[in-house]
């Protein structure tokens, strides 16, 4: 499932508004729902491929490669113009 970048940013912004203690870091989104937060973008192997991470500046990254069992291989920046 591909999510429009603006929808991902809006989802992350709503979550951040209700979780003020997590101002920085990245909000993790799977199939349109926030399921977690990390203080920084790291450990792609701990996420499944297809997960999105949205940072405080609105930059969006996608976990790619790998599989559901072993996790993703890398975080890749999402090009807002190439979606």
Image: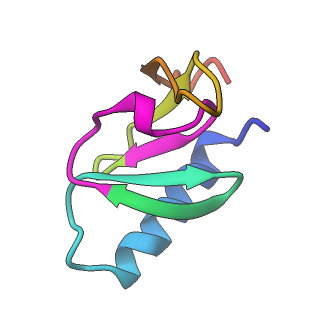
Residue 19: x and y in percent read 33, 79
Which residue is at 40% across, 30% downward? 44
Up the image or down, 7 lies above or below 14; here it is above
Which residue is at 21% across, 66% downward? 23
Query: In this image, 3 relative to 45: left or right?
Result: right
Name the residue at the bottom extreme. Answer: 18
Query: In this image, 61 relative to 43: left or right?
Result: right
Up the image or down, 44 lies above or below 37; here it is above
Magenta highlight on residue 45:
yes
Residue 83: x and y in percent read 68, 24
Query: In this image, 45 relative to 65: left or right?
Result: left
Magenta highlight on residue 72:
no
Q: Which residues are magenta?
A: 38-54
Quarter of the image for residue 49 reads: top right
Residue 42: x and y in percent read 28, 34
Quarter of the image for residue 70 reads: top right
Which residue is at 42% across, 38% downward? 46
Q: Quadrant of the N terminus?
A: top right
């Amino acid at each position: 499932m591909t999510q429009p970048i603006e929808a991902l940013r809006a989802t992350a912004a709503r979550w951040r508004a209700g979780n003020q203690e997590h101002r920085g870091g990245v909000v993790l989104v799977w199939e349109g729902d926030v399921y977690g937060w990390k203080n920084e973008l790291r450990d792609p192997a701990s996420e499944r491929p297809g997960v999105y991470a949205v940072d405080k500046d609105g930059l969006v990254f996608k976990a790619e490669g790998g599989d559901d069992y072993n996790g993703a291989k890398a975080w890749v920046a999402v090009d807002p113009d190439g979606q």
